[in-house]
Image (cartoon, rainbow, N blue to C red):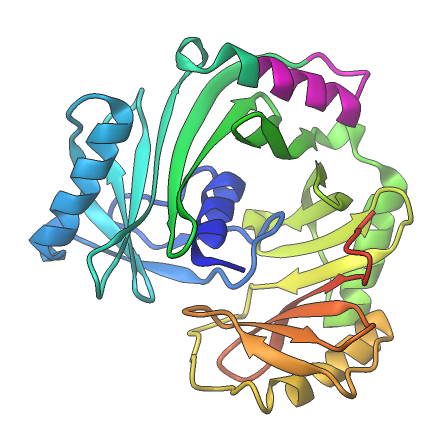
Amino acid sequence: MKTGQWLLAVVIATGVLLTPYSEVTAAPGAAIQGVAMMKSIKLAEVDKKIVEAAKKSLSQLAGKDVELIDSASIYDTRVFIRTKEKEDDGYAVVDKKTGKVLFVSITVSKDKADPKQVELALNTLKEVDPAQTFEAEKVMKMISYEDKAGEIASASIQGKHFNVLLHGDKVEFASVSYPKSEWNADIKKKAEHEFKAAMGRTKEVASMTRYKGKGKDVWSVLGKNGQTSVDIGAETGKVWRVSDYQATGKTDKKALTEKNAVSYASAFAKKVFNLDLKGYTAKKVPDFPVYEMTKKGSPMVEVDFNSNKIVTSMSIKPVNGIQN
């Protein structure tokens, strides 16, 4: 999981990452791993070069000069800075050590969006749920800066209960959220059962979303504030991910190593997914407490740990790469 992809996924899944003068929990929704509590500080406490870099990038994407709110949020080495404008709401993510802008986004009204992208998004949503009527309300324009790939421009077409992410003329994923009256009763029951079996406590369902993208078609069942989640295949009914961030606490990046991470994940994998991790090797995702575990010919396993070396999230990706 590349840094730019992670940051983009965070912004898409959470909608709003920053709240002035408060701590914010980013919800580990679809595709989100390793998100922990963010610390909020005054903007004046942030290095001026970082603030200037954020403002410059945001202004360029907005096509006009922007103002920043008087606060920033810190997650590990990442500084999240938000614009003051309510209409053109924007974020910049800057590396605290290097001062390099990693991600920038601006939300604009739909009349400023690419009509072809909007049309493509609405057509894709019809594939997810033909019975619903969808109308675009706003667009989030984004640029992520990968070390090797360079700039990657994306757009998120958003409306009531839906979101579609595009890279140019290609749809990356589409998600549709449902009101409680329209929740799938069987999926809700299965998510509650599987969560309790995995974590030993009851899950209170707060939202249900159908998520369809490259190699993925799942129901994502979230708890309050998105701190608990279970992903269930829309076609197979298989559980592909179980997450519980409610008792994560402070993440200690030194708590685990690539050599011993598999041993700490083995019991959870066996209990929840009936998967034996013998022969697996782990590779840590840079800057985040996330480990990708692989074994030739076997499913890939992505794991988050807390500071007590306890698994807080595990996702299984089959050999064919399809979760459905």
Residue 181 at x, y percent in the picture: 77, 28
Residue 246 among those drawn in magenta: no
The quarter of the picture where residue 197 lies is bottom right
Quadrant where the N terminus lies?
bottom right
Residue at the image point whose x is 52% and y is 87% from the top: 257
Q: Does any portion of residue 150 appear in the rendered image? A: yes
The quarter of the picture where residue 269 lies is bottom right
Residue 120 among those drawn in magenta: yes
Residue 63 at x, y percent in the picture: 23, 21
Q: Nearer the viewer, residue 216 or 146?
A: 146
Q: Does any portion of residue 84 appear in the rendered image? A: no
Q: Which residues are magenta?
A: 118-133
Residue at the image point whose x is 75% and y is 46% from the top: 215
The quarter of the picture where residue 61 lies is top left
Residue 71 at x, y percent in the picture: 20, 47
In the rendered image of this protein, does residue 33 appear above or below residue 212?
below
Q: Nearer the viewer, residue 241 or 1?
A: 1
Residue at the image point whose x is 79% and y is 51% from the top: 323
Determine whether, in the image, residue 316 is placed left or right of residue 302: right
Residue 64 at x, y percent in the picture: 19, 21
